[in-house]
Amino acid sequence: MTAQPEQKQQHKPRAGESSTMEAVRLRRVNRWLAQGLGGELADLYVDSRERSAAAAHRSRSRLDFLNRLTGDIRRPGFAMLIAETDHLVGCTFGFPVGSDGFWWLGFDGALPHSIEQLTASGGVFAITHVLVQPHPQDQDVACRLQKRLLSDHQASLGAIIVDQDDHSTLTSLRSWGWLDVGEVWRPAGPTMFRALVLPLGERTTARLEGLAHDARTRWPT
């Protein structure tokens, strides 16, 4: 089985936008090719987060990312989408959330009813990472990646869990349309996480209207 190339998306540059963004292509990658791209993806992960970090720290970050990637690749329904020009500029990947709701284990308090219903109907897709190369238009690439991954899998809602101390990632996700819905504890360690969701489509967005208001309260501008 091989990766299926996506049709090149036409992108009309705005004033001051690099023409490089015109050539961005989105491409689906299967689990075997994803494993082979591990080194490039780890570099993208580190560059998108810690360009000025010390070499030893970057090396540990690469290894941690590769270990997480290997674990995700083994999950049922794993899917990856990459963005590229003449080189890799972005990536997102994840897997379907089971209708049994096990993915939400450790959620602090009652899971919002709208999210519970979407989970039970199989309409939630967990996104593990959204990685983009630092660029003035990286928000455009990130939004295209995450929306395409969800639509490819007929998901109505994206879900992600992030270390609450990872402020840069939380800020980026919020700018890309994610809504904070609460705290999550994972049995594997003492770290507290933030759970965020990304609605796809007007109908789902309307169902989460109350959460959007709560998110604005949690995230002061």
Image (spheres, rainbow, N blue to C red):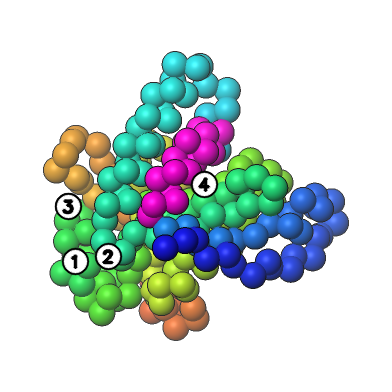
Report the span colored magenta.
31-47
Q: Is residue 19 visible?
A: yes
Residue at screen point 41% across, 29% down: 61
The answer to if 35 sits in the magenta stretch is: yes
Which residue corresponds to mark 1?
101
Q: Find residue 5 and name its label.
A: none
The disc labelled 1 sits on which kind of residue?
Gly
Query: From mark 3 to mark 4, how far is it between C-alphas?
Result: 26 Å
Label 4 environment density (alpha carbons within 10 Å; few <14, some 14–19, many ≥20): many
The answer to if 8 sits in the magenta stretch is: no
Q: Find residue 97 and name its label.
A: 2
Which residue corresponds to mark 4?
131
The disc labelled 4 sits on which kind of residue?
Leu
* Circle nearer the viewer, 2 or 3: 2
Residue at screen point 47% across, 35% down: 39
Give the overall secondary structure of the magenta segment.
helix
Task: Identify the secondary structure beneath mark 1.
Answer: loop
62 vs 194, left or right, is right
Q: Is residue 114 above or below residue 86?
A: below
Task: Identify the secondary structure beneath mark 4.
Answer: strand
Residue at screen point 26% across, 79% down: 121
Q: Position of residue 185 (x, y in %)?
A: 20, 46
Query: From mark 4 to mark 1, how far is it between C-alphas?
Result: 26 Å
Which residue corresponds to mark 3?
106
Q: Is residue 49 visible?
A: no
Q: Is residue 205 above or below residue 135?
A: below
Q: Quadrant of residue 117?
A: bottom left
